[in-house]
Image: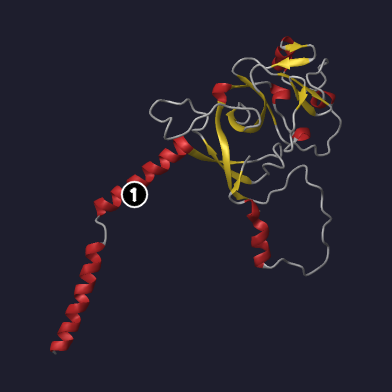
Amino acid sequence: MTNLADGHGTQRGGWSELFLHLPTLPEAAASLLRTIVVALFVLTFVAQPLFIPSESMEHTLLVGDFLLFNKQVFAPAAAWNRWIMPYRDVKRGDIVVFHHPRPPLLVKRIVGVPGDELRIVDGRVIINGVALNEPYATFEPAPPNLFRDNFPAKVYTDPQVDPDWWRLMESLTRNGELVVPKDEYFVLGDNRNHSEDSRYWGFVPRPAIIARPLVIYFSLRRPSSTDVAQAADDRLGHEKELAARIMDFARWNRIFLVVH
């Protein structure tokens, strides 16, 4: 009887000690609140997710990529945060996230900075008389387009070009080169033949640039309009195994890929 009582007592003592270590309701609420505050801080000031819906940045960014982008790197450096969150200005070659009317956020690459004299000849970007070295640029097949491939154009030939931009472009063209104004940036998609960018709607104002992509944290396998069509497999009884379908669901090799 004594041993049985001791056994029950030990068991009750063990459960009591366990419950003593569980957080109280106020402690749990405080912990949850701290987590929410940290998450909101990160999403508001440091990083934010973004989905790539189009092929304009292939093959740097693919349709279906999910990005985390750094919202602080291009923010004005205040005295209180310049040592905590390093700041630098926008430079040529940067991939940037910026506000745009259609859609609200776009991702493109900076090719022209204030003061640059820019032109495009047969698809090649020339800045201040020197052709840019652009290993990231791709030229997927597309019908010929004189406006797209030779810029700035002398004749209004493409209905996709914003008329207001056309008039401004004419006023800023000197000797066949577009002069980039102060606090404005000229951007292009890396997929040069399949990107609506500064060629079509103009400069990006400095205040509109809000972030720089950091890393691809996930990538769904999604078709692009520039993909080469694959012949259908008409053989019977070839349903993919579950493991194969899971592997095909995402581009696993792109997860945690740094964007540059």
- The 10 Å Cα crowd at callout 1, few under 14, some 14 to 19, many 20 or more, is few
Q: For the residue labelled by badge 1, is the local secondary structure a helix, a strand or a loop?
A: helix
Look at the image and name its color scheme. secondary structure
Residue at 45% across, 36% down: 44
Q: Is residue 169 left or right of residue 210?
A: right
Residue 6, given in percent of the width and then of the height, sits at 16, 83
Classify the position of the C terminus by image quarter: top right
Q: Is residue 250 visible?
A: no
Q: Is residue 66 left or right of residue 41?
A: right
Count of marks placed on residues: 1
Please say if 70 is above or below 8: above
Residue 230, given in percent of the width and then of the height, sits at 82, 53
**Which of the 4 image quarters holds residue 9?**
bottom left
Residue at 19% across, 81% down: 8
Please say if 217 is above or below 13: above
Classify the position of the N terminus by image quarter: bottom left
| Residue where numbered disc 1 is placed | 32
Nearer-the-camera pick, 143 or 260: 260
Spot the residue most to the left.
Answer: 2
**Which of the 4 image quarters holds residue 21?**
bottom left
Nearer-the-camera pick, 218 or 76: 76
Spot the residue most to the bottom.
Answer: 1
Q: Is residue 85 visible?
A: yes
Residue at 58% across, 29% down: 98
Q: Amino acid at mark 1?
A: Leu
Nearer-the-camera pick, 216 or 105: 216
